[in-house]
Image: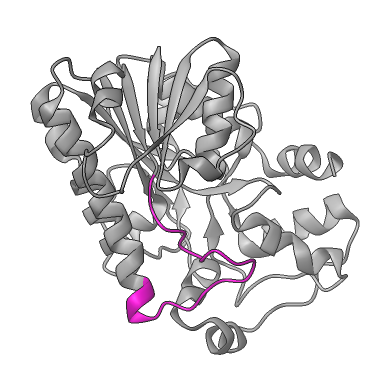
Amino acid sequence: MNVLITGGSGLIGRRLAASLAAEGHQVTILSRNPERISGLPAGVQAAAWDGRTAAGWQAHADAADAIVNLAGASIKGDGFLPSRWTPKRKQLILESRVHAGQAVMEALRAAAAKPRTLLQASAVGYYGPHGSEPVAEDAPAGTDFLAGVCQQWEASTQEAESLGVRRVVLRTGLPLTLEGGAFPLLVLPFRLFAGGWFGNGQQYYPWIHIEDYIAALRFLLTTERTKGIFNISAPYPQPNREFAATLGRVMRRPSWLPAPRFALELALGEVSTVVLDGQRAVPMRLLQSGFNFTYPELGPALQDLLQRH
């Protein structure tokens, strides 16, 4: 299989590319600066794109069996600590996703032989903040900033379905990996013996082990009967207070020092919603499709991740 990955130089893109290449698939990752990418495994090449059009990479789309559209500016920013959501930052978060989707559609419309499959990234933020009720794929969209971003992100490639391309939308939860993303921020206070929950601790975190994340993408790439919306998260999301208690137990650190809501809102501004709000998203359609999780429960997932370091 020949797979094209937009946003392929990021954490998830590189992990997926390496996993596919290890089994003999050919992978092309698109990047604005391909010359800066090093250490790619055999079977993976980097190509340039501008994130807005099909200019310069149309031939790669013509040769692809599948496209995985992961492109988009980081929600938390590029530094270790989250960046505030200024109007400029919000615009970048939204436009980087919508423009990437528009570029993919330009390439699909022009392709002589269209790829069979398109995996379109999104996030469980689509649903907006929720309480303790389970949130499956048929739940309505939320009304906050992240929900609006996800709606436009998903809509940017909806036309692919009318072109005969099987489209799968990936509403992703919190990937657990120490290589990047939000998880290292959650771990750091526990390393410093200052771990605890955020706010009231009742908000749910729909987490997923990085290996299950990549396995789910592989499953959806190759399982032709799947299409539509899929929550990419483990079957048993946890409230933040229980997440913190489990993390503390695995790390053998205390988990009794909460971070008050007002303090996080003061320090982070609107981006604090990422840790203070959540949804009990459940992967109903993944389970119904026959996907098997290696780490369905949080304790073993954390043990596996943290015992490696």
Q: Is residue 245 above or below residue 115?
A: below
| Residue lying at the far right of the rendered structure | 252
Q: Is residue 164 above or below residue 89?
A: above
For the N terminus, give its image quadrant: top left
Q: Is residue 65 magenta?
A: no
Q: Quadrant of residue 119?
A: top left
Q: Quadrant of residue 29?
A: top left
Q: Position of residue 169 (x, y in %)?
A: 31, 37
At a point 66% along the width and 32% down the height, the residue shown is: 295
Q: Position of residue 215 (x, y in %)?
A: 54, 25
Q: Is residue 233 visible?
A: no
Residue 283 falls left or right of residue 168: right
Residue 69 falls left or right of residue 176: left
Total numbered badges shown on the rendered structure: 0
Q: Observer-nearest residue: 307 or 94?
A: 94
Q: Position of residue 268 (x, y in %)?
A: 54, 81
Q: Observer-nearest residue: 283 or 93?
A: 93
Q: Is residue 80 magenta?
A: yes
Residue 123 falls left or right of residue 207: left
| Residue lying at the far front of the rendered structure | 35
Q: Observer-nearest residue: 278 or 268?
A: 268
Q: Is residue 136 above or below residue 194?
A: above
Q: Is residue 121 above or below residue 1?
A: below
At a point 61% along the width and 24% down the height, the residue shown is: 41
| Residue lying at the far left of the rendered structure | 162
Q: Observer-nearest residue: 283 or 76?
A: 76
Q: Position of residue 258 (x, y in %)?
A: 72, 77
At a point 25% along the width and 24% down the height, the residue shown is: 59
Magenta extent: 71-89
Q: Is residue 57 visible?
A: yes
Q: Quadrant of residue 49?
A: top left
At a point 17% along the width and 37% down the height, the residue shown is: 105
